[in-house]
Amino acid sequence: DTGVSQNPRHKITKRGQNVTFRCDPISEHNRLYWYRQTLGQGPEFLTYFQNEAQLEKSRLLSDRFSAERPKGSFSTLEIQRTEQGDSAMYLCASSPGGLVTDTQYFGPGTRLTVL
Amino acid sequence: AQSVTQLGSHVSVSEGALVLLRCNYSSSVPPYLFWYVQYPNQGLQLLLKYTSAATLVKGINGFEAEFKKSETSFHLTKPSAHMSDAAEYFCAVSEKTSYDKVIFGPGTSLSVIP
């Protein structure tokens, strides 16, 4: 069990550019979650997957955001035409199978800075 | 709609003193409740969770929390603070009907003074 990994750990981009983040969940974890955390705030739910199916999306996930989990393993989160307001820590978490007793295990996050 | 409030964005305690971090929730249905800890440059780690079993929940590192429905509270305590407890603590809630969607509070930064 190597834990949830996220790449890159830091990303600096200019406003208007597209960025893509990757999350590798714990092996055999069926559920994968994306959160956004801004300075001084708790994580905010963005979306989650059961295997390759995206089951719920937050209103925070505007049309510029898209998440995929094509083979039910790793996931990508893409932000198009980045804005300064997108600057935040993007967290990924995974859990085994969606039972309420399952724990969500978090990765270290990708810190995005939009200049 | 669910929400979580954490009283006190910063709490300082002396090493060896009682730790009390406050959390109140709002939920239209019976909730599940969580406490997570975040150390600098690390991911969130689950301390403990309440899922409608015992109202007093024991977690890792000597922490525990008590679910009080009448007060809509889920305060986190530890009898004796250790320097290594300095971190950011987040209370979170989810609903039984949508337990994957976890709503986090704003967090409380705990400092431990030697």
Image (cartoon, helix red, strand yellow):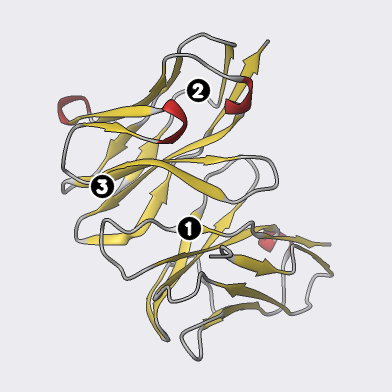
Badge 3 crowding class, 10 Å Cα cut-off, few under 14, some 14 to 19, many 20 or more, is: many
Residue assigned mark 2: B8
Task: State if disc 1 and disc 3 touch (CB < 8 Å).
Answer: no
Looking at the image, tell me whether mark 2 or mark 3 is earlier in sequence order.
Answer: 2
Q: Amino acid at mark 3?
A: Tyr
SS class, disc 2 = loop
- In which quadrant of the rendered image does the C terminus of chain B lie? top right
The x and y percentages for residue A26 are 51, 69
Residue assigned mark 3: B32
Q: Chain of mark 1?
A: A
Q: Residue at x 32, y 59 (%)?
A: A102
Residue B82 sits above or below residue A110 on the image: above
Q: Quadrant of residue B57?
A: top left
Residue A101 sits above or below residue A67 on the image: above
Q: Residue at x 17, y 35 (%)?
A: B54
Measure how far apart labels 1 and 2 are at the Cα level.
26 Å
SS class, disc 3 = strand
SS class, disc 1 = strand
Residue assigned mark 1: A105
The x and y percentages for residue B46 are 44, 45
Which residue is nearer to you in this view: B31 or A96? A96
Measure how far apart labels 3 and 1 are at the Cα level.
17 Å
Q: Amino acid at mark 1?
A: Tyr
Left or right, residue A46 beside residue A98: right
Q: Residue at x 56, y 43 (%)?
A: A41
Numbered disc in front, either 1 or 2:
1
